[in-house]
Image (spheres, rainbow, N blue to C red):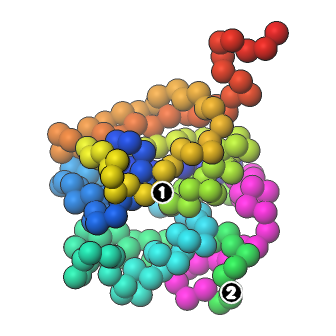
Amino acid sequence: MSELLVDFITSLDGHASGEGWPGFWGLEGPEYLAWLSEQPQATYLMGANTYRQMSGFAAGEVPNNQDEFRPEEEASVDELTQASKVVFSTSLEEPLTWANSTLVRDNAVEVVRAMKASNSGLLSTIGSLSLCRSLLRAGLVDRFRVVMFPVITGATGAERIYDGYPDVALMMIESRTFDGRIQLVEYKPSVLEHPPLGAPA
């Protein structure tokens, strides 16, 4: 059976991106980049918006406020291009132009449930906030991992990750600090029907 990992890269205040900020908020270091390169092979799950953005990068579109890709960004996009990707969308049209991408129009929760039951490899999300929220609500997420960069993007932050989430209990299974400033926390999530205290009688 496959394991499903929801994987986020965030500011401390829970934004997935920020206007004017480069990838990794410009704060990635050698320890973090080495750890990224050591991650196991996975099938990546994403929605249409993430696909459009990432496939654009793969086609040479440079992120806003940059003249060119930094080497670590280019390497990350190249690795994603080589990986198997499943894209959930009713708005995209076939054929998808990004290599190794499969378009799925069916209900994402049911498809991922079947993928977990029939495969043995790692499934991992990339971006795709609404997809991740749906998979978590359905109880399909085995691991919930967040890498927090030491910035607060109160003025420029975009894509607030946890808006619309259910209450979730998190049991920590790993934590690590990279380059003296980047914090990884990884949890086993359990969706709650109500808070553990003060529940209705």
Q: Earlier along the polypeptide chain: callout 1 or callout 2?
A: 2
Looking at the rendered structure, the secondary structure element under dot 1 is strand
Q: Circle 1 sits on which residue?
A: 159
Give percent across and percent down for residue 80: 44, 71
Mark 1, residues whose alpha carbon is within 10 Å: few (<14), some, or many (≥20)? some
Q: Which residue: 59% across, 78% down?
A: 101
Q: Nearer the viewer, residue 64 or 145?
A: 64
Q: Is residue 171 left or right of residue 76?
A: right
**Relative to 79, is 146 above or below?**
above
* Spatial CA span between label 1 and label 2: 25 Å
Magenta region: 96-117
Q: Which residue: 47% across, 28% down?
A: 172
Q: Quadrant of residue 125?
A: bottom right
Q: Nearer the viewer, residue 136 or 174?
A: 136
Q: Amino acid at mark 2?
A: Glu
Report the disc number at residue 93.
Answer: 2
Give percent across and percent down for residue 34: 25, 55
